[in-house]
Image (cartoon, rainbow, N blue to C red):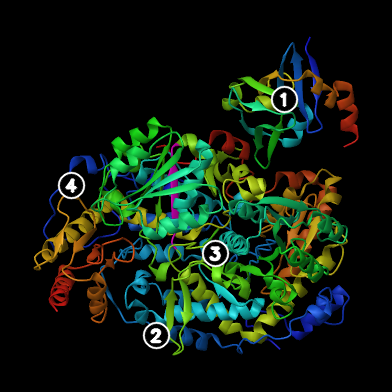
Amino acid sequence: MAEMYFTKEHEWVKVSGNTGKVGISDHAAHELGDITFVELPKVGKTVKQFEVLAAIESVKAASDIFSPLSGKVIAVNDELDATPEVVNESAEEKAWMAEIEIADAAELKNLMTQDQYTEYLKTL
Amino acid sequence: MQLIYEQSVAGRRGVKLPLSDVPAAAALPENLLRKESAALPEMSELDLVRHFTNLSRRNYSLDTNFYPLGSCTMKYNAKVLENSAALFASFHPMTALLPGGVDFCQGNLGMLYDLGQMLADITGMDEVTTQPLAGAHGEMTGILLISAYHRAKGNKKKYVVVPDSSHGTNPASAAIAGYEIITVPTASYGDMDIELFKKAMNDEVAAVMMTCPNTLGLFNPHIKEISDIAHSHDALMYYDGANLNAIMGKVKPGDVGFDVIHVNLHKTFGTPHGGGGPGSGPVGVKKSLIPFLPQPRIVMDDDGKFLLSEQCSTSIGRTANFFGNFSIMARAYAYIIMLGREGLIQVSEQAVLNANYIKERLKAYYDLPYDMTCMHECVFSASKQLEHGVHAIDIAKFLIDKGYHPPTVYFPLIVKEAIMIEPTETESKATMDAFIEVMIEAAITAESNPQLLHDAPVTTPVGRLDETKAAREQNVCCAW
Amino acid sequence: MNDSHYCPHTPQEISEMLSAIGVDSVEELFSPIPAELRAKTFNLPPGLSEFETFDKMKSIAAENGGDMLAFVGGGFYDHIIPAAVDHLSGRSEFYTAYTPYQPECSQGTLQALFEYQTAICRLTGMDVSNASLYDGGTACAEAAMMALRVTGRNKIIIDGCVNPFSRQVLKTYLYNLDVEVVEIAPLDGMLNRAELIGMLDESVAAVLVQNPNFFGCVDDFSALAQQIHAVDALLIASVYPISLGLLATPGEMGVDITVGDGQSLGNPLSFGGPSFGFIAAKKTYIRNMPGRIIGETVDKQGRRGFVLTLQAREQHIKRHKATSNICSNQGLCALRGLIFLSSVGRQGLVDMARLNRDKAEYAKSQLTGIPGVTVLQSASTFNEFTVFLPKSADLVVAELLKKDIVAGVPLGQYYQDSDNCLVVTVTEKRSKKEIDRLVRELGVAVCN
C-alpha cells in the first residue's frame, strides 16, 4: 500500500515507487465547503516543492494547492472537471488531482506522516 | 416570476418607431448580415411595464427598507439630485473634443472643475480628476499615478502594502498596476500593527493603501506616524475613500500625509447605488502627482474659460473614454452645494453619532471584538450566537424576514462571523430603535429557537438559494 | 442646528442618544482623531435650499450651448430612448438598492441582470455574458487582460481602426503589466490584413478589432478568426450593439470575446456617462471573465431564483489574484439596456438598425453630391461613414458648430494624413430635413 504524507497546507501525497498522487485532506475539503471547481495543472508542468500546483474553489473561497514534492506532472484527474463534488465526497481517496514523477524523494522529510498530521490538526 | 423571454409572443411589438423619410438603402453584402434576428423579447408595452414593475417589488431598497450595509454608506438619495442629473441628458461628450467645441460645453466642464475643487478642499488634496468610473477604478488610477511618479524619479519599486482588513479591491487594483502585495496584520487595538508595519516597510515599497477610518470603523491614531514612515522610504500613501463619510470637515486625508485619494461619490455624496452601479470614483492627488493625471485634463485659463489639456507627456493616459460618469457627478455636485460647509460637517457628526448609538445599544447582545468609540460604522461578531449554532448569515436572513436589509456580513475578513453595521446620518432615531429591537430579538431567538433563524427567510419570494448548484452548473443565460 | 436637510434628529433625540452612548457631546466621539491632525480649514460655501440648488444646476446647464443638431458618434450615439426606460429604471426599488449580495431580497435586480445577460448573448451570438463593466473602453482593456490569462501569453495586437479612446484606455491599463501592445495602422479605413497576418505567431494572446470600425466601415472577420485560432490566439471584437440589428454577429464570425459600449441601448448621452460596458465570451472562458455574473439556481423548495455566481473569481474573495479589480459595475445602466431591448423588441431592433443605415446612406449620397466631397466607395458602412473634404475637417466642423450643427468627428487628431477626413454619424433620430440642412451648410462651409 502506498504511503501517505501531508503538508501543513493540508495537501497529501501518496507515494508509489517514483511517482506520487496529490490531493487535499478531508479536513481541508471540509473547511472549504462545497467545492465548485478544481483548476488542474497541465500534464508536463514541472513544479517545485511547496509551489502552486493547482487551485480549488468553493462558493465563497478560493485556495491554491501547493505541491508536496518537486517533480513533473504526468497525469491529472480529469473527472474533477465535471464532478468537483468528488473532493467533498472522497478527498483522500477518489479526489486525487495530479500524479507527479518525484524529482527528489529526500524531500519527504519535509512532510508529515498520517499520525503527525492528525496531531497537527489538533493544534489548529 | 416568469422570465421576460417566457412571456414573449412571436410577432408582438413594443414601442412604435418612426417611419423612414428617406429612400431604402441598397442591401449590404450577405456575409456582413446576421442570419437570424436576435431573439429579444416580443411584448406589449403594458406587459413590459408590469414585468419590470413586479420585478422591482422583489427588491429591498433604500427607499423601501432600512439598509445598514456596512462599508457601503447607504444614505438617502435626495430626489432633487435626480432632477438635476436629467438636465444634462442630451449633451454629447464628443462636442467638447471637437475643434472649438469647448465653447459649447462651458457649463459642463466648469461643473467638473468646480466639483474637483470642492473635493480637493474636503480631502486636502491639490487637484482632482473626475475620470475614474467607480471606486475600484479610482484605486487603479491612483496606483497607476503612483507608479508613474516612481518611474519618473527612477525609483525601483515592487510592493504595495495593505492591512489585512482592507477592501479586496485594494490588492486587486495594485495587482493590475503590476505590484506584489505585502499584507500587514491587525493589532489588538483594531488597526494595522505598527510594529509589524515597520518591519514590512522597505525601499521597494511603492505605496501603502489605507482606509481611514478602517473597515472596523476605527480611526487609526498612528496614521501620521505610518505616513511619515512610508514617506521615509519614498513610498506614497493611498487613501481608500470608502469611509470618507465619517470625517468631513473633521480631518483631511491630505493633512495627515496621504498623497492620493479616491472618493466614492455613490457613498459619501449621496448618489444612488443603482443596484450595483453606476458609481463614480474621482481621484485627488498632491502637487507632486499632478503631472501624471489622466487626460484630457480640465483646466481654467486666465479669463476663467475652461479648456481641455491633452499635451502632457508624463500623463498615464486615458482611464475612461470621456470625462467619467458625468451625470453621477452632477448629482454629487448638487449634493455638495445643497448641504454646504455646515451641512457636510453635520453629515459626518450624525453618521458617527448613529453608529455609536447602535454599537452601545447592541453590545450587551453581540460580541464587540474591538470595543471602543467607532466612527461611522461598527463591527460585531456573531460568536456568542455561534455557541448555539447560529451564524452571522442566519441573523442576516432573519432581518430580511423582519423587513430590514441585513448589514454587511463576513467582512472584514479579520472578524469571525462579522456583522458590520453602518446606519448613515439620514436614518431617524425611531428607525434605528426599531432595528435595534429586532437585532435584540435575533440574539434572543438564537438561544431560544435557533431553527427559526436557520429557516429564515420565509417571507421572501424565494428562500435561501443553492449557490453551489449555481456555481457548478453555470446557467448564466436563458437557454430557451 | 439642522444644517443638512437630510439629518433628521431633533436636539432632544441627540441628547438621548448621547446619554445612551455615555458621552456629553458629539465632538467627544471624534476624540480618537488626534487634535493635531484635525482639519484647520474647510472652505466650502454655505448650503442652499432644494429650490436654489436646482436653480443653480439649471443655470450651469444653460451655460452650455443650446440644442445642437448632432451628426457625431465616436462611441456615443444619439438614439431614441423609449419612455418606459426612464420610468421603469427610475423606480427607486431598482435605483436605490445596492449590489444584490442578499439574493432573497434582491431577486428583482438579480433576475433583471440574468435577463440582461441573456439579451447580450442573443444580440452578440456569444454563450456567456457578465452583468456589465464600466464602459466600452475599459471593456476592451478587461477583454485583453482576460485573453492574457486564458493564453498565458503577453502580446496584444490592436487594429488601429478601433476607437482611439478605447485604444488609449487599454494601453493605460496594460502599461505596467509587461505586455507588448502592437498597433496596426489602418489601410484605407480598414484593417491591414496582410500586416496582421504577418505578425500572427505563438506569442500573440489576442487581436482586438472593432465592427463597424472608427471610420464606420463594416467588416467580416470570419476568415481572420480562423487564422488567429490557428496560432491559438483569441479574437476580441468591439461592437456597436444597435448595428447588430442587421450585421453579422461576433458569434457567427467565430469571435472569442465580444465587448462594447452599451450607451446606445437606452442610456442618455449625459456628456459621456454613465453608460455601461458589456463583455460576452465563449462558454469555455467563463472562469476568466471579469466582474459580476448572475446564475440561475433553486431554493430548498425547488423555486427558481438567481444569485451572484462564480464569485471566487472576484476581488472580494481572491483579492490580488482576482480576474479583475472591478467591484461596482453599471447595473442600472445595464437594466436600462435590457428595458430598451425589450421595449424595442426583436423586430424593432431590426427596423431601428435599418432606419439608421437608410438615413446614413441617404446622407452619404447627398454629401457626395457636393463638389470635392467623396467617400471610400469600396467599404460598406452602417450609420457612420468617412467623407473626404476638399479642406481641413477641423475648420469645417468649427464653422458648423457656430450654426449649432455638430457635423462629425474630424480624423486629423487621431490619424496621420487625415486632416480632411470627417466621420459623419446619422442615427434614426435625424430627419431628412435635418440631413438636408447638414448637407446645405457643409456645402457652404467647404466652398468658403
Q: Are marks 3 and 4 on the same chain?
A: yes
User: Position of C10 compared to B47: left or right?
Assistant: right
The kind of residue tagged 2 is Glu
Under tag 1, what secondary structure? loop
- Chain letter for mark 2, please: C
From the image, tell me which residue sits under label 1. Answer: A70
Task: Point out the stretch of residues depicted in magenta.
Answer: C275-282
Residue under pointer 3: B279
Depth check, mark 1 against mark 4: the one in front is: 1
Mark nearer the viewer, 2 or 3: 2
Residue neighbourhood size for the residue with mark 4, other residues' Cα within 10 Å, grouped as few (<14), some (14–19), many (≥20): some
Q: How far apart in space, not on screen, are marks 2 and 4 (Cα)?
A: 43 Å
The residue tagged with tag 3: helix, strand or loop?
Answer: loop
Residue B91 picture location, percent across and down: 37, 73
Q: Quadrant of residue B374?
A: bottom right
Could you tell me residue B429's position as x and y percent?
Answer: 74, 74
**Marker count (numbered):** 4
Q: Position of residue B279 (x, y in %)?
A: 54, 64
Residue that extends furthest to the front in the rendered view of this protein: B154
**Label 4, on which residue?**
B28
Q: How far apart are the two marked residues, 1 and 4, measured between alpha carbons?
A: 60 Å
Q: CA distance from mark 2 to mark 3?
A: 26 Å
Of the residues shown, which amino acid type is indicated by label 3?
Answer: Gly
Contact (CB < 8 A) between labels 3 and 1? no
Image quadrant occupied by the N terminus of chain C: bottom right
Question: Which residue occupies the foreground of this view, B48 or B146?
Answer: B146
Q: Nearer the viewer, mark 3 or mark 4?
A: 4
